[in-house]
Amino acid sequence: MQFKDSVIIAAPRARVWEFFTDPHAVGACAPGLESLEVLVPDEKFQVEGSVGFGAVQVHFVAQVEWLEMEEPERAKMKAHGTAPGSALDAVASLELRESSESETELIWSADVTVSGTIASLASRMMGSVTKKLAGAFFNCAKREIEG
């Protein structure tokens, strides 16, 4: 599955960059996140959480690794996660464009592959659930950055 969107944030690009490259700041807005541990600063972290697909609640563990960081313009990360009988692989990227001195356009994309039990149980709901979670995440991030 591929997802992409953009959001305008009323803050300078440097501030938006700082937020989105700080795992703890981002984690505070991640729906369902239960724990976050930095394994290698500025390189790798691990998260645990849960997400619901209708009546199916899934607990997962994932490792996230930065692949590219070109401050303050773009970043790319990959994630590999597991849940009972299932796996998730994702590559996500963000690009920051200065709209003005006080506004930044964040353009994001994610390519997500889910396999196993979750893929078969929740395949029809996955797209809408992912869009809902992304919307909640970016609304929270925008509030946090804009203050």
Image (spheres, grey):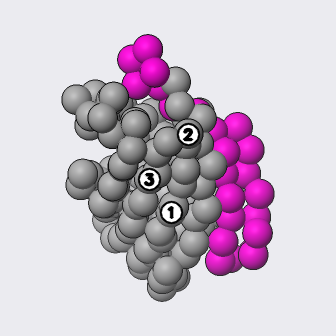
Q: Is residue 102 above or below residue 131?
A: below
Query: Within the image, what quadrant is residue 50 found in?
Result: top right
Report which quarter residue 15 is drawn in.
Answer: bottom right
User: Which residue corresponds to the image point at 66% horizontal and 71% vertical from the top-left?
Assistant: 44
Of circles 2 and 1, the one toward us is: 2
Q: Which residue is mark 1?
A: 79
Residue in view at x 77 percent, y 57 percent: 37
Q: Position of residue 110 (x, y in %)?
A: 33, 59
Does the magenta portion include 52? yes
Residue at x-position 40% and y-position 60%: 90
- Tell me the amino acid under the disc marked 1: Ala
Q: Are marks 3 and 1 in contact (CB under 8 Å)?
A: yes
Can the viewer see residue 146 in this picture? no
Q: Mark 2 packing: few (<14 Cα in 10 Å), some, or many (20+)?
A: few
Q: CA distance from mark 3 to mark 2?
A: 11 Å
Residue 55 is marked as none
Q: Amino acid at mark 2?
A: Pro
x and y, in percent, of residue 132 in the image: 36, 31
Q: Position of residue 124 (x, y in %)?
A: 22, 29
Residue 84: mark: 2
**SS at mark 2?**
loop
Q: Nearer the viewer, mark 3 or mark 1?
A: 3
User: Which sits earlier in the primary sequence, circle 3 or circle 1?
Assistant: 1
The residues tagged by marks 3 and 1 sit, at their Cα atoms, a distance apart of 8 Å
Q: Gap in Å between the C-alphas at discs 2 and 1?
A: 17 Å
Q: Is residue 84 left or right of residue 101?
A: right
Task: Give the magenta-colored segment's residue range.
Answer: 33-56
State which quadrant residue 91 falls in: bottom left
Residue type marked 3? Leu
**Label 1: which secondary element:** strand
* Contact? badges 2 and 1 (CB < 8 Å): no
